Amino acid sequence: MAQKIVAANWKMNLNFQEANTLISEVTNILKDEKRNTAEVIFAVPFVYVYHLSNFLKTQPFAVAAQNCSEHEKGAYTGEISAQMLASVGAKWVIVGHSERRLYYHETYRIIAEKIQRALQAGLKVIFCCGESLEIRNKNEHIAYVQNQLEGSLAELSVEQMKNIVIAYEPVWAIGTGKNATAEQAQEMHAVIRAYLKKKFGSEIAQNTSILYGGSVNAQNAKSLFSCPDVDGGLVGGASLKAREFAEIVKVYN
Ligand code: PEP
């Protein structure tokens, strides 16, 4: 059985004070919930990883970075390595978010390299995939996502795949308020699981968490998370509101 996961992606939002307030509010709401079954992850800006990892050390919540370098170390001014992130307490890293593919021109190869660096550093990876509206309208979304998976995951071993979570995030649903329907999400999640089965075998297919992302909120989370192949969510905008994010986590209680 795949672990249920609800991950917050704060993106480039919140100053340090606001970040502290938000994390305190969310964890306060969730800490009295004895029945939390989902793993909760906060993907925070780099500069907060150390502080928030320490803050959450004794709590059942983990910190993720939103990106890492494809290089191990060296003369790459301004970059942050996976090893650095692990050394300041990150447990996870998001790789291949559509905003990074689009604005920072991350190719399948670069994403594959980032995944290798992250796994070598002992981080777990939330690998994002998903099609644009243009591709969906041409009815090419399934082949497109299969290509994204093959393009960046194909070289991983079965052992490495145990530390990968996949987030299906249709680009047209991210930050638009227009989430995929439960049927659309389930269709693609089943395609992703079928790919995992063919490539890495039944055990990996069954045990890999496949998250849905794209305008998840407290109203639609239940119907999306009820799909048989949806194991939770990657939540952007709604993760910046303590009460709403906690409501989304509580879908699994
Ligand atoms: C995201 O950026 O990963 C995301 C899903 O954003 P939103 O929930 O705001 O659509």
Image (cartoon, helix red, strand yellow):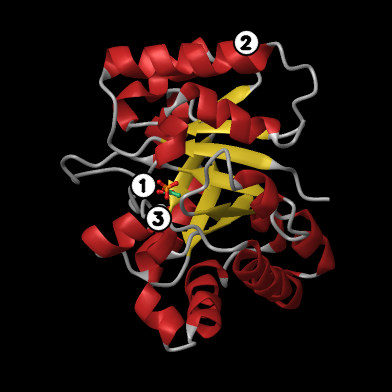
Instruction: Say few, some or many: other residues with alpha carbon within 10 Å of mark 2 (under 14 / 14 to 19 / 20 or more).
Output: few
Mark 1 C-beta closer than 8 Å to ligand 1: no
Q: Amino acid at mark 1?
A: Glu
Can you identify the residue that label 2 sits on? 58
Q: Residue at x 33, y 32 (%)?
A: 45
Mark 1 vs 2, N-terminal side? 2
Q: Residue at x 38, y 74 (%)?
A: 133
Q: Residue at x 40, y 70 (%)?
A: 108
Q: CA distance from mark 1 to mark 3?
A: 30 Å
Q: Residue at x 57, y 38 (%)?
A: 218
Q: Secondary structure at mark 3?
A: loop
Q: Secondary structure at mark 2?
A: loop
Where is residue 102 drawn, in percent x and y?
27, 64
Q: CA distance from mark 1 to mark 2?
A: 30 Å
Mark 2 C-beta closer than 8 Å to ligand 1: no
Q: Does residue 119 appear in the picture of this structure?
A: no
Can you identify the residue that label 1 sits on? 72
The residue nearer to you, when weighing 83 against 137, is 137
Q: Amino acid at mark 2?
A: Thr
Look at discs 1 and 3 and give the one toward the viewer: 3
Instruction: Say few, some or many: other residues with alpha carbon within 10 Å of mark 1 (under 14 / 14 to 19 / 20 or more).
Output: some
The residue nearer to you, when weighing 182 against 165, is 182
Mark 3 C-beta closer than 8 Å to ligand 1: yes
Where is residue 53 drawn, in percent x and y?
48, 19
The residue nearer to you, when weighing 100 against 68, is 100
The residue nearer to you, when weighing 116 against 182, is 182
Look at discs 2 and 3 and give the one toward the viewer: 3
Mark 1 vs 3, N-terminal side? 1
Where is residue 51 drawn, in percent x and y?
40, 15
Q: Is residue 136 above or below residue 52?
A: below
Mark identifier at residue 174: 3
